């Protein structure tokens, strides 16, 4: 397989790597490889970077079989990794069953939590110091809006974060690429991305937010770019103070409703 990235794609990946200090000499990077379009592109892109970077880093992949009824096509994944000359670890789990047992209405959070835990454990056990995930710009913007709508928080995931419990650094090199760009490029590869085996695909809160953003952006093309700009810390404007505690409210109530002694005569003159 001849490996190459269009200049614009390479520029966006390198921008993330340089701006957020995602890669450096001697790194051992384990890619979370679901087999879908995003993680397939990430693995391919990092292999291109590995071949052309002015510093050395190792690259591996891990596929976590979540235990859905639709089994992972492991030989298909192995062939793609063989063509890239990237070692692949496949870990079978029962995460789907556990997540569904915890919450049948919204198992996504539990599923993601346990999947990340498995990847981190494998990375630490095999001597990788970094784990790479294929979250792109659309994912970041959707997470940003989801956090406000469903959690009441202004936050999204970071391009780089350190996990002190496992001594693993999580990196997301695709944060400047749009989902549509990734989909377009993957069609040029001699590899068919594996469809998601999740029965909740297209029925999640994330999917609802994705459709909301797409709908609003069709009406006003600046909606998406404004949301993306608002994720930056320097975008914060005027916000309300934190909600007062019950004790703070009691003291404020006393000060407001019971003027200090001696105030009454001032107003009676």
Image: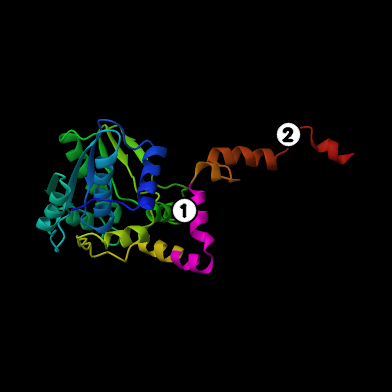
Residue assigned mark 2: 260
Q: Are marks 2 and 1 in contact (CB under 8 Å)?
A: no
Q: How packed is label 2: few (under 14 Cα within 10 Å), some, or many (20 or more)?
A: few
Q: How packed is label 1: few (under 14 Cα within 10 Å), some, or many (20 or more)?
A: few
Q: Nearer the viewer, residue 191 or 4?
A: 4
Residue 162 at x, y percent in the picture: 33, 35
Residue assigned mark 1: 148
Q: Nearer the viewer, residue 222 or 113?
A: 222
Is residue 222 highlighted in magenta?
yes
Q: Residue at 80%, 38% (x, y): give it.
A: 264
Is residue 159 highlighted in magenta?
no
User: Which element carries disc 2, helix, strand or loop?
Assistant: loop
Q: Residue 105 lies in what quarter of the image?
A: bottom left
Asked if residue 244 is positioned above or below residue 101 in the image, the reply reads above
First in sequence, mark 2 or 1: give its number: 1
Magenta stretch in the rendered image: 214-231
Side of 98 where 237 appears, left or right: right
Cα distance between the residues tagged 2 and 1? 41 Å
Q: How is the image coloured?
A: rainbow
Q: Residue at 36%, 61% (x, y): give it.
A: 180
Q: Main secondary structure of the magenta part?
A: helix
Q: Is residue 243 visible?
A: no
Residue 146 at x, y percent in the picture: 42, 55
Q: Is residue 124 visible?
A: yes
Residue 60 at x, y percent in the picture: 18, 42
């Amino acid at each position: 397989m001849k490996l190459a990235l269009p200049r614009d794609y390479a520029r966006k990946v390198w921008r993330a790597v340089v701006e957020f200090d995602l890669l450096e000499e001697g790194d051992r990077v384990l890619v979370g490889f679901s087999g879908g379009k995003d993680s397939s592109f990430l693995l391919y892109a990092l292999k291109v970077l590995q071949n052309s970077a002015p510093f050395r880093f190792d690259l591996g992949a891990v596929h976590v079989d979540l235990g859905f009824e639709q089994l992972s096509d492991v030989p298909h994944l192995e062939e793609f990794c063989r063509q890239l000359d990237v070692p692949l670890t496949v870990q079978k789990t029962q995460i789907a069953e556990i997540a569904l047992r915890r919450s049948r209405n919204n198992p996504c959070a539990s599923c993601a939590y346990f999947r990340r835990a498995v990847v981190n454990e494998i990375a630490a056990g095999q001597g990788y110091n970094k784990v790479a995930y294929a979250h792109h710009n659309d994912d970041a913007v959707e997470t940003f809006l989801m956090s406000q709508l469903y959690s009441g928080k202004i936050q999204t995931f970071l391009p780089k974060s350190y996990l002190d419990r496992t001594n693993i650094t999580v990196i997301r090199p695709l944060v400047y690429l749009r989902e549509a760009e990734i989909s377009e490029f993957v069609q040029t590869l001699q590899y068919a991305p594996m469809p998601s085996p999740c029965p909740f695909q297209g029925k999640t809160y994330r999917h609802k937010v994705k459709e909301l953003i797409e709908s609003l952006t069709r009406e006003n093309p600046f909606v998406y770019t404004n949301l993306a700009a608002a994720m930056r810390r320097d975008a914060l404007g005027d916000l309300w103070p934190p909600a007062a505690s019950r004790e703070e409210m009691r003291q404020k109530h006393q000060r407001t409703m019971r003027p200090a002694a001696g105030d009454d005569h001032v107003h009676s003159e």
